[in-house]
Image (tube, rainbow, N blue to C red):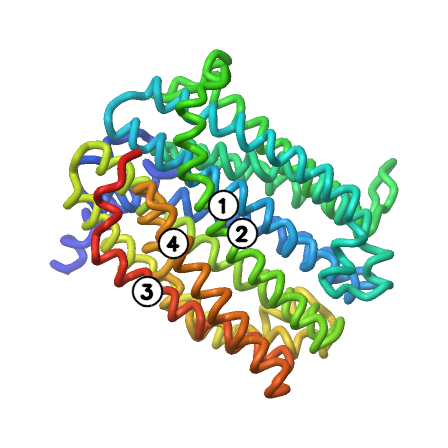
Amino acid sequence: MPSFTNDAPKASRYVALLLKALRGEEMDYTQGSIRKAVIMLAIPMMLEMAMESVFALVDLYFVGHLDNSREAIQTVGLTESVLTIMYSIAIGMSMAATAVVARRVGEKNPEEAGHSGAQAILVASSVTLVLSMAGIYFAPDILRLMGASAETTAQGSTFTRIMMGSSMAIMLLFLINGIFRGAGNAAIAMKSLWIANICNIILCPVFINGFAFVPAFGLTGAAIATATGRSIGVLYQVYHLFGSKHQMKIRLSHFIPDFKVIRSLVGIATPGIFQFVIASCSWIFLAELVATTGGDTGSAGYQTALRLMMFFMLPAWGLSNAASTLVGQNLGAQNVQRAEESVMKTVKYNVLFMLAVSIVFFMLGGWLVSFFSNDPAVCAVARTALMIMSAGFVCYGVGMVMINAFNGAGDTWTPTWVNLFGFWTFQIPLAYLLARYMEWGPKGVFVAIPVAETAITIAAFILFKKGRWKKIKV
């Protein structure tokens, strides 16, 4: 009985803290309890990233039950792999926006924070527009380059065109949410993804299978639903950027080009974009290697496992994003020690989360895979991939926080070099050696992934402890 009475107030405090985080109540992250600061940021950030991963899972679920499910799954997976280049630009710019906005908020300068966010939107939109148009035109060539069969290319080109054409919505979702995260308004970022996903979940079966006066578009319908859902989420973001009562908001005058701010943002974003382009291109190479050594079955199984893995990895990335905001704001407030303590506290929580995910995959991996495909051969490959790749989840959890800590400080070059050497001089050669020369096929790729990620985590942790990130000026 005494333990119950002692625990009850503690439990009620955590419930109250959870509700505050979900409501998006603003607080000063440069003082007070670090645990409270991490929880207030991490909960909405984790839910936000979970919602981002739901886009691909919803598409995968519905197209996985079409008659041509093998080709459809491969199209969704390969298109998502190519879209990671767009994600890289969006994430790179959002990292720059988060770092600069967080630093300005830490300095108690919300006007400059809003101005910096608007400049980031201006730059990223211009670049994304050009790449989006190229993606629409070269969609069939992109699928062929990725190792898709002629049948998959013929059936999936329209899907790829629509997804590439909606890149602006993808970019704005990431970028504007980065602005909100930098300002400490993680709940708005979360809600925008919730709205976008609810729309996607409702529209996917409507456009794929048809309903009332809406014809059945099949695989193409998944792209229409996703593009529409993301666009609605962006409209919600824009409303809060311009019309909210939060401490930071953007005005139209903020979009007048300010080349000093643009140079600062580009200086931070460029290595950040390279950082994720390096990682994304390595994943594209791995996807192509699996497709060419394992055929359509191996590719579909790998893409199924990858989507499931990312569903759990993205919330962990969201939790690690808390470190980015806390580092940026506390460096802005000249509180370096608190910034470092916030990172280590976030590492602890992320390790516990990824350990739980590993246990789930080992115990329920087969059931999770079967939920997304009726093909026994595809399920067998996906189950093997999950078992192997999840072996490194705990290390992933540490590495994510380290990378986000560097990015939050504006030190985007350090993780860029770590990714370059980790992925391109280690992971890809190892995957090629195992898959081709040792004739392990797709299994060789699966093994190379956790081995390389563990090496990247060790390197990032050592560099973090050296402390160069503490001296970066933004």
Q: Position of residue 89 (x, y in %)?
A: 54, 42
Q: Are marks 1 and 2 in contact (CB under 8 Å)?
A: yes
Q: Earlier in the sequence, mark 3 or mark 1?
A: 1
The three-letter amino acid code for the residue at tag 1 is Ile
Provide the residue designation for mark 1: 273
Mark 1 and mark 2: span between their CA atoms?
Answer: 6 Å
Q: Quadrant of residue 269?
A: top left
Looking at the image, the residue that sits furthest to the top is 253
- Residue 320 visible to an observer of this rendering: no
Q: Residue at x 24, y 26 (%)?
A: 107
- Evaluate if marks 4 and 3 touch, with contact meaning CB atoms under 8 Å apart: no
Contact between labelled residues 1 and 3, with CB atoms less than 8 Å apart: no
Q: Report the Cα–Cα distance between label 2 and label 4.
A: 12 Å
Tell me the kind of residue under disc 2: Val
- Which residue reaches farthest left? 2
In the rendered structure, the answer to whether residue 251 lies left or right of residue 65 reads left
- Tell me the element at label 2: helix
Mark carried by residue 415 = 4
| Relative vertical location of residue 37 with respect to residue 125 in this rendering, above or below | below
Would residue 274 be found to the left or right of residue 333 on screen? right
Residue sitting nearer the eye, 90 or 45: 90
Picture quadrant of residue 101? top left
Q: Nearer the viewer, residue 105 or 12?
A: 105
Q: Of callouts 3 and 2, which one flags the residue occurring earlier in the amino acid sequence?
A: 2
Instruction: Say left or right for 328 vs 181.
Output: left
Label 3 vs label 2: CA separation?
19 Å
Q: Earlier in the sequence, mark 4 or mark 3?
A: 4
| Distance between the alpha carbons at the discs numbered 1 and 4 | 11 Å
